[in-house]
Image: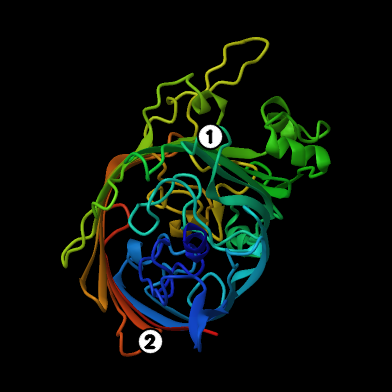
Amino acid sequence: MMNRLFHLIALIGASACAWAQTADSTAVVVEEEVLVADTVPAEDAPATVKLHPYEYFALAQAGVASGEHNPFWLVANRFGLASIDKTNGYIRAGLIRHLDPNPRFSWGFGVDLAGAFNYTSKFVVQQLYGEVRYRSLNLTLGSKQWTNGVVDPALSSGDMLFSANARPIPQVRLEMPDWQWIPYTKQWAAVRGYFSFGHFTDSRWERNRCRPVDQTYAEHRLFHSKGLFVRGGNPDRFPLIFEGGLEMGCEFGGTAYAWSPVTNKYEIVKFPKGIKEWIKAVIPMGGGDSNDPNQAGEISNVYGNHAGQWSAALSWQPKDAGWSARLYYEHFFEDHSMMFFDHVWKDMLLGVQVNLPANPLVTSVVYEYINTRDQSGAVYWDWTPEVPDQISGADDYYNNPNFGNWQQWGMGMGNPLLLSPIYNTNGSLLFMHNRIKGHHLALRGTPHRDLDYRVLLTYTRSWGTYRYPVRNMRHNFNGLVELTYRPHQLKGWAACLGVGADGGNLLGGSFGAQLTICKTGWF
């Protein structure tokens, strides 16, 4: 069952065809199992099972808003298939062949395409991948929506390192998606993890956005990610479960186009991307081209834009009780000093989730506190022979001067409350509000068997960045009420209505609605 549920996660997201457990709770759960089965009874013989591994989906979405832009929660955490424009929409269709979790070997693929209006591109290849599974290992080639970490992607404000906020990155990804028992632990300890290399797809979009307004950008960036999680406890034996892990990501290679206000032209920096650089993306080490003075920082520090996070969760899951509680924590870091304990871990995403027994009002509640103000302090100084002191501060979350920042198509790959560069009116790809404090409350329920709802309420305050502080602290309120109707008389059909609103002086005021109609099926 867990194998099947995993492959349901993160397939369609971002719209009314996203599955329950993905980042977009406008879910259309067609069947509980990934592979639909027809039971064909034979006379005086056991029933046989015919599996339907192929799934199709088609949907149309349209939104309209007043004010500054499309409301925040109608944009964020939808796998990048969203628009900040006040009028927008798309038509989307796809075909998925799910992996069969029963045999040792299985294969699958996904094709997920969209034609969009007032988006960053008119035609979107949202997912295009092939995958194989052997025993506990999956190998995926291409763009596929996925989430990791300890947060609930439908209710959380978003994972700090890899959220569901940006478009999928095409990659080769080897993973162990399900918990596997560690030998000799008597089924009290388990492990899962992943390892990938990929390539960003937004080079032309960055060039078209940044070059006309003299903003720095990067082309042909490469991507690497890895993660390892461990779990302690067995929910069948004792209700207290611990899980935690370390994840890291890296941008490397490519070409940086840095605008110089002194020469009034772009300084072009081509970063090497040979086998040595691929190794340095996996194991952070100094690198770059020693003949290029613009790469001095890469040579003296580490090659590439590295980021990561520690995460942990403690869950209480009484067996057959119908309820559970979960406390979780994420610590994001940009460098070695914050990876370990050179500085006090003041920055965090701290959350609690309670899943209630079945009732018509509320089934899940999430509260989160986020703080990114410290960033290991306000001062950074790299040692020199004259002044050998090293002060590793001002980490500047999600920003990097050489590698295009922690974003894909203008949408941040981490927590969206650190506002994505797509909101910048000057064409810059910088995260201009990465020093924030905020509170996030989310509710989910099923008042009727055909009706689900989701409510997100978020309040944040921003101090800008250490390099570009705001003169006066800014604040914003973001709200969303979302209703998803799945009539049981019309199998596979669903309609989702989302109403969002923003207020405050960070993003400005806005009010909008978004309607999605979706049809899914199996064969």
Measured as percent of width and height from the top left, residue 102 is found at 59, 64
**Quarter of the C terminus within the rendering:** bottom right
Measured as percent of width and height from the top left, residue 430 is found at 51, 48
Rendered view: 393 above or below 496: above
Q: Does residue 30 appear to the left or right of 381 in the view shown?
A: left
Q: Residues within 10 Å of mark 1 (few under 14, many from 20)?
A: many
Could you tell me which residue is drawn at 34 percent across and 62 percent down? 73
Could you tell me which residue is drawn at 49 percent across and 19 percent down? 342
Q: Which mark, by number, is residue 124? A: none
Quarter residue 228 falls in:
top right
Q: Is residue 440 shown to the viewer in this render?
A: no
Marked residue nearer the N-terminal end (1 or 2) = 1
Instruction: Please give the residue where the numbered disc 1 appears in the rendered image.
Output: 334
Q: Residues within 10 Å of mark 2 (few under 14, many from 20)?
A: few
Measured as percent of width and height from the top left, residue 518 is found at 41, 83
Rendered view: 489 above or below 310: below
Instruction: Please give the residue where the numbered disc 2 appears in the rendered image.
Output: 491
Q: Do the residues labelled 1 and 2 touch (CB within 8 Å)?
A: no
Amino acid under disc 2: Lys
Q: Does residue 43 appear to the left or right of 417 in the view shown?
A: right
Q: 33 and 27: which one is in front?
A: 33
Could you tell me which residue is drawn at 39 percent across and 75 percent down? 28
